[in-house]
Amino acid sequence: DVATVAFCDANSTSEIHEKVLNEAVGALMWHTIQLSREDLAKFKSLRVIVRVGSGVDNVDVKAAGEMGVAVCNVADTTLCLILNLYRRTFWLANMLRDGKKVSGPEHLREAAAPCPRIRGDTLGIVGFGRIGTAVALRAQAFGFRVTFYDPYLPDGIEKSLGVERVYSLQDLLFQSDCISLHCSLNEHNKHLINEHTIRLMRPGAFLVNTARGALVDEHAVAKALKEERIRAAAFDVFEHEPFSLSASPLKDCQNALFTPHSAFYSDASIRELREHAAAEMRRAIIGKIPEALRNCVNAEFLQLPGNHGHSAAGGTAARSAAASAYHPTAGLSANTAAAIAALNGPGGGAGAAYPTGPYAGLAPLTDRDALAAAAAAGGLVSLPMSLPPVITSTPIAVSQAAAVAAAAAAAAAAADGHKGSGEAEH
C-alpha cells in the first residue's frame, strides 16, 4: 500500500534491469544471490535490503552501511535430522526400498548399528539464538541433556530454560554426544568444525549442520566420517550450493545424510517469512532508517546525514550525498510547509491512518487510483505489500519514483482539504 513492486528473476546483479538498479529504494531477497561491494554500487537509490530469513552472509553488510544502506533479517528439521541419526530411520527405510530383508534383532543390529538410546545423551548446541533455543526445548522433550555455547549471550538465560552452559567451544565438543550448529557465519568462524576441532570431539559423536555450510570443513568431516571418528552426520547446508553430491568431498560417506537447504521450509513458514520481510520493508519506506527497523543488522556501519557523514553508494558521482540522504518527506519540497506538516499532524487530515512514524498521515497512498497513477509514472507493476506476492530467489525492488509521486499527490490533497476548512492557516 506504500510502494510499487518489481520482480527480478535474477541470480546476480548483472541480470537485473537497469531501471530497477537506478530506481529501487529497497530490495527483498533470499540467500541465493550475492551482494558484494561492487554489486551494491550498481544500485543508485537503494536505502534498505531485507534478507528473507536469518543469515546475511550473502550481503557485504559493512559496505552496505558505508553506502547508507540498512540491512535487515527476519527447528523442526534439525530435530528430524538428529532423530534420523540416532534411530537410523533413513538408512533402514532405504534398505527395505532396495529389497533387503530385515527380520529380528540380529538383522536389525547389523542393519541399524550403531543405534544409541537418546535419553541421557548430551546435545551440544553452538549458537543459542531463536533457532538454537527452539531446538533445545524440543530436544529436552526427547530426553536429551542440553548444553550450549554462545559467547554473545548474557549470563542467566540457561537458568530460565533448564539447560547448561559452557564458556568454550572446546568444552562443548568434549561433552557432547551430538553437536548441532546454529550460529551465523562471519569472518571469524569459517570452518569452525575442522581437523583440529574434530579431534576435540567425543569419538563417535554425531554432527548436524542446518546453519551455514561454510561453518564446516567438508574435507575434514569426510575424513572423520570414513574413519568413524564422527559416527554419522546430517547436512542441510553446504559450502557450495546448490549441492552436487558428485562434486562433494562427502560423496563416498555412507554415514552422511543430506537435505537441500530446506530446514526453513513449510507452507506456513514461507508465508510468515514473506509477511515479516514485507512488513520490515514497509517500515523502512514509511519510517526513518534505522530507527523504524526492528532487525537492522548493520546499524553500527550505517553512515547517514548527521552520523559521521555519508558515502555515496559505490563512490559514484551518479549518487550524490544529497540524493542519498534519506528522509521520508524527500521529494516533497515543492509543497507548502502546511502540506508537509499535515503529513505528521496529530489527527489532522489523513494522519489517523498511520499514528506513528515520520510518514504518519500518508493514508491517501492506500488509494488505488493514486497507486495506479504512481505505478504508471514509475513504469513498474504495483502490488499491495500487505498481500506478499510469490517471492522468487531474487530481490524485489521498490520504486522510489512511484512512492514519491503518490506522496506528493497525497500532500497536495491534504493541504487543499485543510485550507478549505480554515485549518491550514493555523
Image (cartoon, rainbow, N blue to C red):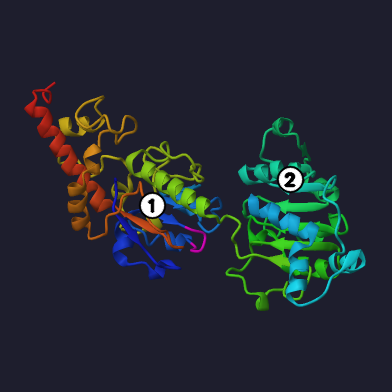
Is the magenta region chiefly helix, strand or loop? Answer: loop
Dot 2 and dot 1 residues touching (CB under 8 Å)? no
Nearer to the camera, 324 or 380: 380
- Secondary structure beneath dot 1 equals loop
**Residue under circle 2?**
139
Residue at (77%, 42%) from the top-left corner? 147
> Looking at the picture, does residue 343 appear above or below residue 113?
above
Q: State left or right for residue 203 relative to residue 37.
A: right
Dot 1 amino acid type: Pro
Dot 2 amino acid type: Ala
Q: State left or right for residue 293 relative to residue 231.
A: left
Nearer to the camera, 217 or 393: 393
Q: Position of residue 359 (x, y in %)?
A: 29, 36
**Residue under circle 1?**
388
Taking the magenta stretch, the answer to whether it contains residue 316 is no
- Stretch of the chain drawn in magenta: 30-34
Taking the magenta stretch, the answer to whether it contains residue 32 is yes
Query: Residue placed farthest to the top in the image?
Result: 426
Q: State left or right for residue 191 relative to residue 41.
A: right
Q: Is residue 192 visible?
A: no
Residue at (9%, 28%) from the top-left corner? 419
Tag of residue 221: none
- Secondary structure beneath dot 2 equals helix
Q: Is residue 168 visible?
A: yes
Nearer to the camera, 381 or 156: 381
Q: Earlier in the sequence, mark 2 or mark 1?
A: 2
Q: Quadrant of residue 353?
A: top left
Nearer to the camera, 148 or 25: 148
Q: Position of residue 218 (x, y in %)?
A: 72, 67
Query: In which quadrant of the rendered image does the C terminus lie?
Result: top left
